[in-house]
Amino acid sequence: MIKKICCIGAGYVGGPTCSVIALKCPDICVTVVDKSRDRIAQWNSDKLPIYEPGLDEVVSQCRGKNLFFSTDIETAIQEADLIFISVNTPTKTFGNGKGRAADLKYVESAARMIAEIATNDKIVVEKSTVPVRAAESIMNILRANNKPGVSYQILSNPEFLAEGTAVQDLLCADRILIGGEDTLEGQAAIEELCRVYEHWIPRENIITTNTWSSELSKLAANAFLAQRISSINALSAICEKTGADVSEVARAVGLDSRIGSKFLQASVGFGGSCFQKDLLNLVYLCECLKLPEVGRYWQGVIDMNEYQKSRFSAQVISSLFNTVTDKHISLLGFAFKKNTGDTRESPAIHVAQTLLDEGAILHIYDPKVEEAQIMEDLSPLGLSDLKTRINIYHDAYTATRNTHAIVVCTEWDEFMELDYKKIFSEMTKPAYIFDGRKILDHDNLQRIGFNVQTIGKKLTRAAISRVWGSQTQV
Ligand code: NAD
Ligand code: UDX
């Protein structure tokens, strides 16, 4: 029976996942450890290091009872029956596989720590997203450093939560996937982990596979999801040139029950720490397996996403009379999606960089992203006058005042409820809105007097005058 769990890595996955395990398993003591003192201090404070709806409540219910955040990695490993490895697995930035392969140095260092510290049997669970057969490397490290009387079982238990809905996703997971060795000991370890999840997930939603299927299924799930977005974004480009409306196309296509309606929202492009990284990881795997055609297929999903981000940024510039030099442009939203403060691979970074490159002055507002994070994300541009060309605001009204254009980069609900009449009256004319998330009421904005552009639908003067006759101001 699992009595003590240790999770190495107190990030976007380790923190929420273990908080929910603690909430649902009062009989298990869960300790989340991290090498970052700052992060652990934040987990132990009133302001958690990540913003997730519902997470504060879960943490405050369990912290200090059966949920602990600590930098004492050694004790937590020593005492645990089961250890989750939930460290980051970023794309390699150097050496072999640079720009594509997953960098497994953090996973390896976690495995080495376990090997060094453990003096009794452990179930080690790969929670991080890893290339297929990564469990083999972990096993090699653990078994090569085996102490007498210590045995290990390695399981793969990838996480499918999405940021912004992490708590809900964890509470009502579509499925829990557990991969392990097809041996008596392997099956027993799988059973132990099943029992943890069975505290709140119905048994029929917990599926077990061999280790490699589990590892590959995680990469496959993210690749499929990203592929749907790239598919609808590819169609959005056709819509803009033909008069079709991508929302209508998505609805018509998604109503086919074989296709389904989710993840067909055309956008400025997908962001986040997972899709691009895991696709690149899959492409690299294909190359290593000498499957170049398969690799090219998945690379196409990434290429389409790059195209979409560039296409949208170029559309902003060309609409603003082909020059944005010294123009004031407000960016509404900087996070990669709503309900998170995470900016990793956010399409807003691409848009901001392109506009800055062209000489624009940016006014940025995001409800959850800290100013320091925005400056850090944009500093790789190396602009000497960056500080004077980026202005960060704490509300949308001051951010948009005296600007030539608004670019919506994140679909925050509050952007739908703004008083756009007031905003219009305080902008430089002609005033433009570029809705990269398709969340605004475009007819209403045009009525107010905005020049409106969005993804996957050409908003023409003709279309407006059909609705509003001679009243149109566009
Ligand atoms: P993260 O960067 O937010 O957190 C990782 C944490 O691990 C960091 O706090 C880091 O300090 C810590 N760490 C690294 N090496 C360590 C070590 N040796 N000892 C102690 N702590 C160490 O990353 P994340 O977003 O939580 O992602 C973790 C993994 O989960 C990745 O493999 C990712 O692909 C996968 N994943 C992420 C998401 C997501 O939505 N973010 C969803 C599913 C899966
Ligand atoms: C994703 C997976 O959904 C999750 O299962 C996995 O565990 C981690 O990676 P996440 O990146 O947190 O989760 O968010 P997700 O909701 O998938 O959105 C990713 C990006 O795609 C965001 O930038 C989002 O705005 C964009 N997106 C999503 C679209 O552009 N259109 C859509 O229809 C859906």
Image (tube, rainbow, N blue to C red):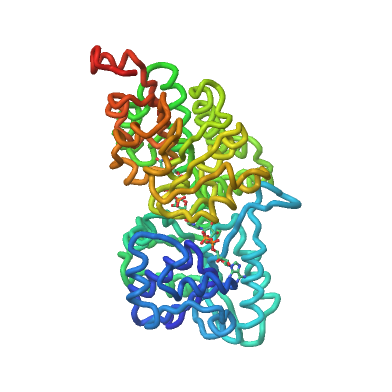
Residue 27 picture quarter: bottom left
Tell me if residue 184 can be seen: no
Q: Nearer the viewer, residue 316 or 218?
A: 316
Q: Tell me the residue at 51%/64% (across/down).
A: 11
Q: Quadrant of the C terminus?
A: top left
Residue closest to the eye, 423 or 460: 423
Location of ligand 1 given as a quarter of the image: bottom right
Horizontal arrangement in the rendering, residue 209 relative to residue 472 (left or right): right
- Please identify the quadrant where the N terminus is shown: bottom left
Q: Viewed as shown, does residue 178 lie left or right of 381?
A: left
Q: Residue at x 38, y 26 (%)?
A: 452
Relative vertical location of residue 3 with respect to residue 202 in this rendering, above or below: below
Q: Nearer the viewer, residue 188 or 169?
A: 169
Q: Residue at x 36, y 77 (%)?
A: 62
Residue 454 point in image, percent of width and height: 40, 29
Q: Nearer the viewer, residue 305 or 100?
A: 305
Q: Is residue 38 above or below residue 102?
A: below
Residue 242 place in picture, x, y as percent: 41, 16
- The answer to whether residue 209 is left or right of residue 463 is right
Q: In this rendering, does residue 325 appear at all?
A: yes
Residue 87 image point, x, y percent:
56, 65
Q: Name the residue furthest right.
A: 95
